[in-house]
Amino acid sequence: MNLKPEDIFDLLLQDGEIIDPDQGLHCKGSLAIKNGRIAGLGQDLPGEAAKVIPLQGKIITPGLIDLHCHPSLGFYGRGIPPDEVGLNAGVTLLGDGGTSGAANFHAFRKLVVEPAKTEILCFLNVAQAGLISMPEISSLRDMDVDRGKEVVEANRDRIRGIKIRAIQSLAEGVGIKGVAMAKKLANDLKMPLMIHIGDPRERMEKDWMDDFSRQAVSLLEKGDILSHYLTWEPGGLILKDGTIYPELEKARQRGVVLDSCHGLWHFSFTIARHALTQGFKPDVISTDMSIPNILVTQSLPVVMSKFLNLGLSLEEVIATTTINPARVLKEEERRGSLRLGRPANITILEITKGDFLFGDGKGRGSLRGNLLLEPRMVFQAGEMKPAYSRYHIPPLFQ
């Protein structure tokens, strides 16, 4: 048979388990790549391929997306190397969670974002200097909304939202006005607002930070992102006894995006169990990866594995790390799906079975599970790279 060049694929990922929540696909099949794009998907693909990779027992998914992390080594003292949390871990797109602000975004873009092999999109911190000096907002002098608007307009190809941390220094220094200013900026720019809740200290009885978070979350609208909704800290909306503040339910009803956003201080197995039991599943699973939490968080696939062992289905876990964050970032026409013609950004996973121990960091909890999602390879625009979860037994009580 004489095949025409257009009938020959560059690469065929053969006989894997295809899971694409965007298209509602969960089936056995193959995926073809040509010229860096998805050229075929299904069980019986016509034509041949220059290279075939057999994937029996492996999972073919859209390229994983970590919506909230800090891939900023060399710019931010707690930043992690972008490609360590990105392609090396099977993740094809990173969302920087407000490392930089209007005063230093240009430097962040030139020094970190553009040189990284893993693509990075950003949330601009409403604090002028981002997280370079923390706490980042103690007074109105730390915010420059007008300059923030100028920076976003000049960098819309990279900036996809506004970020603010609703922590104690903001509450004491500026109050709820600071959150309202950030929300207005996001609205003016027609972008989502990402808000951090939870203050890294011990919770007091009837903690006043809870009231501040409840006010702040009440300002969020459809498409805005609530980071760390599973935190046990002061300002968290779910208490250790299982009480859930009504503001969380109202936010979910309005279409606010619930992001688990792990980190070191901001995730608790106890809180997660309460949330899942009462139907508050994450819309997005992310790592909040930075140097202080790498020993516990490890990688996006490890965090996904925690939720898999907590009872989420494989399809749900993959949706929260592919099409859901793609929609938040307004990237759903390019990413988060295996639709024909899309750039071939693909992650290959394998479910490994064993006895695995997971930690939640300062939440001081542990979880034993029998499932670990292990990335085996990742494709960026059709180019293959090896990938690893870096799973290890974590230090349980950081």
Image (cartoon, rainbow, N blue to C red):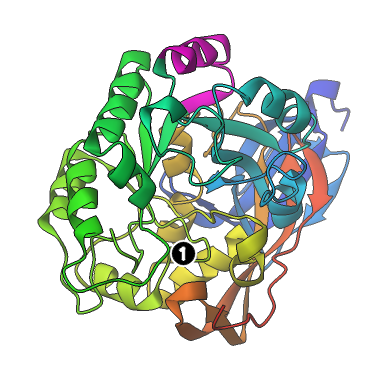
Q: Quadrant of the N terminus?
A: top right
Residue appearing at x 66%, y 50% in the figure: 347
- Residue assigned mark 1: 314
Front residue (pair 51, 150): 150
Residue 203 horizontal/vertical position (percent): 30, 71
Residue appearing at x 43%, y 26% in the figure: 141
Residue 360 visible somewhere in the drawing: no
Q: Quadrant of the C terminus?
A: bottom right
Chief SS of the magenta region: helix
Q: Which residues are magenta?
A: 146-160
Residue appearing at x 54%, y 56% in the figure: 287
60 up-or-down from 37: above or below: below
Residue 245 horizontal/vertical position (percent): 14, 60
Q: Is residue 154 magenta?
A: yes
210 up-or-down from 362: above or below: above
Residue appearing at x 63%, y 63% in the figure: 292
Q: Secondary structure at mark 1?
A: helix
Front residue (pair 80, 301): 80
Q: Quadrant of residue 210?
A: bottom left
- 392 vs 148, left or right, is right
353 up-or-down from 256: above or below: below
Q: Quadrant of residue 58?
A: bottom right
Residue 136 visible somewhere in the drawing: yes
Residue 129 horizontal/vertical position (percent): 56, 31
Look at label 1 and name its amino acid. Leu
Q: Is residue 42 magenta?
A: no
Number of marks in picture: 1
Residue 330 horizontal/vertical position (percent): 45, 27
Front residue (pair 362, 313): 362
332 up-or-down from 269: above or below: above
